[in-house]
Image (spheres, grey):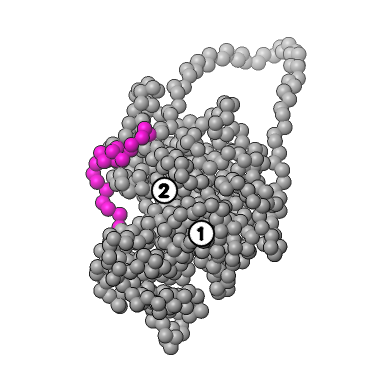
Amino acid sequence: MSDRTPDARPPAGPVLPPAAGTAAPAAGVADGTVGLPPVPPMPLDPPDLPPVSAPEPPVPATLAVLAAAAQVRPVVPAPPSEPPAVAAPTASPAVAAPTASPAAPVPPAPPVVPAAVPAAPVAPPVPGAPAPSRPEGARPTAGPATGPLFPDAPGLNWAGPGDSWSRAWALQTVGDSRPAPTTAPVATPTSMPAADRRTAAEQPPTARDVELIRASLAVVEPVADRATAHFYALIFLHHPEVRALFPAAMDVQRDRLFRALLMAARSAGDPDGLRAYLGALGRGHRRYGTLTGHYGPVGECLVAALARYSGSRWDGETELAWRRVYGLVSSIMIEAAEEAARTSPPWWQGEVVAHERRTPDVAVLTVRPDQAYPYRAGQYTSLETPWWPRVWRHFSFATAPRPDGLLTFHVKAVQAGWVSNALVHRAAPGDVLRLGPPTGGMTLDHTSGADLLCLGGGTGIAPIRALVEEVAEYGAGGRSVEVFYGARQAAELYELEALAALAARHGWLTVRPVLSGPGASGSGALAGELPEVVGRFGPWAGRDAYLSGPPAMVRRGVGVLLRAGVVPERIRHDLVGDLAAG
């Protein structure tokens, strides 16, 4: 579905990168005021993950190939220096037993006057929420091409330059000349001097390191909620300026971290997949204001949290393994972010120029970006609204790239969905959104020549329509395209008329509506659940398959297609599922 990240749960902010690898984005896909230089993402967020188009390959027994994947020197969180020696306290004199004679009077001690303490900075009151939409004809004030337009709008509370929320909380920001707050203490190997430990931590991870990481994760898994909560507590305690980058609710954020770590450990032996995933993650986290200097403190807090909850599995060798892997992860993400910074901004501003309600809970939004926005049909992006700062959700592009540069999104308002409800029920022409970079691997291979099979459920029809438009523009080249478009009720097939018009113009295109709810018979649509209906029309051997829609539909669809003869390498989807939820 085009609303790739179901946002029925509280929102999450930037996340820590996975320890050594990853997985893939949702099918188909307060509270500060304006702030400091944006601060760290938590490196493990898969908000913007690349696609998982095939089952995970078995992990090789060795990690030698992983070292080859690192082409830059790892950024390793420096182990704390040797603790200073503390003199043992001297024995206190024995206290004599009281006697009958009265004790000599003791003059009272002079009162202690506490030193004056400067008052803590007080954050200005958070402005009220803006009106649902601007007056007719109103437009946001123009600003620099890559500069933020939002600080000029009333009632918004972005985290960025001048953010009073960050100013009130920040004791120290990355790059400041003042002494940094003390980082969380972590257990360090004591078998070698600090300089040698630092040098050892800069080496590429080994197969033994991966074994140690997996063993420690197995111990932490039963208490993952407490471990991740402790990690964020350390981050916010020792680096409070980071808190302004996160939404108010952190429960989904805590859920994401440990699952991402598990996926990273499982796929640590796949260097190509590791670099592809972490590269996308590093580029995507630029929208949070991630700086190179943020990775070190985050790594220290991660090691401290793991040390606390790994029990007897934690020792100097295990810590060294985590530092090596985290250093490699950091270096890949930093390299990708710096490369992207040479050619594109961290985010785009986009003005809503059209808002069309297709059903009571589905809207089609047309957005004009403030500068060129290159993307491919089948990809998706993340959107942030002015009403929910620091809350990003994934939505697919509903058209192939257009000559006028406009972008179209299909959004379904889900229950308790913060961003989707704002976009469907509150957004109006003139409102300004922020867009992250495009991502996703559900794109066409025009050199393949294979026939296409496309499954789109609900608003998941958005990227499917974009793919069909791209085939029409490039030319089918003798390939046929079968589209199965599923919904529960006939009224929810809001894009069927447009697809039928495309099929009338192009003989290579076939569109089959599918209804799973009551009343399907007599509607002219196929009756049943979308994956099962597609299976009845098989076999589909030799096809390139594309799936987009609710995560459960995509998972069932993959199973049906595998049984119908489609090889795993030819099944494409962008499914993050629960990892991106919220």
Give coordinates of residue 520: x percent, y percent. Answer: 43, 83
Crowding at dot 1, Cα within 10 Å, few <14 / some 14-19 / many 20+, comes out as: some
Residue 133 drawn in magenta: no
Query: Looking at the figure, which quarter contains the N terminus?
Result: bottom left
The residue at the point 52 percent across, 38 percent down is 234
Residue 26 appears in the figure: no
**Residue at the image point whose x is 51% and y is 59% from the top:** 405
Q: Is residue 276 above or below residue 357?
A: above
User: Which residue is under mark 2?
Assistant: 280
| Left or right of 369 in this view: 137 | right
The span picked out in magenta is: 55-74
Quadrant in the picture for residue 573: bottom left
Q: Residue furthest front?
A: 403
Expressed as whole percent of the image width and height from the top left, the position of residue 517 reads 45, 79
Label 1, on which residue?
405
Q: Quadrant of residue 114?
A: top right
Q: Nearer the viewer, residue 574 or 398?
A: 398
Front residue of 475/203: it is 475
* Circle 1 SS class: loop
Locate residue 269, reporting x and y percent. Answer: 28, 45
In the rendered view, would you say 252 is above or below 444? above
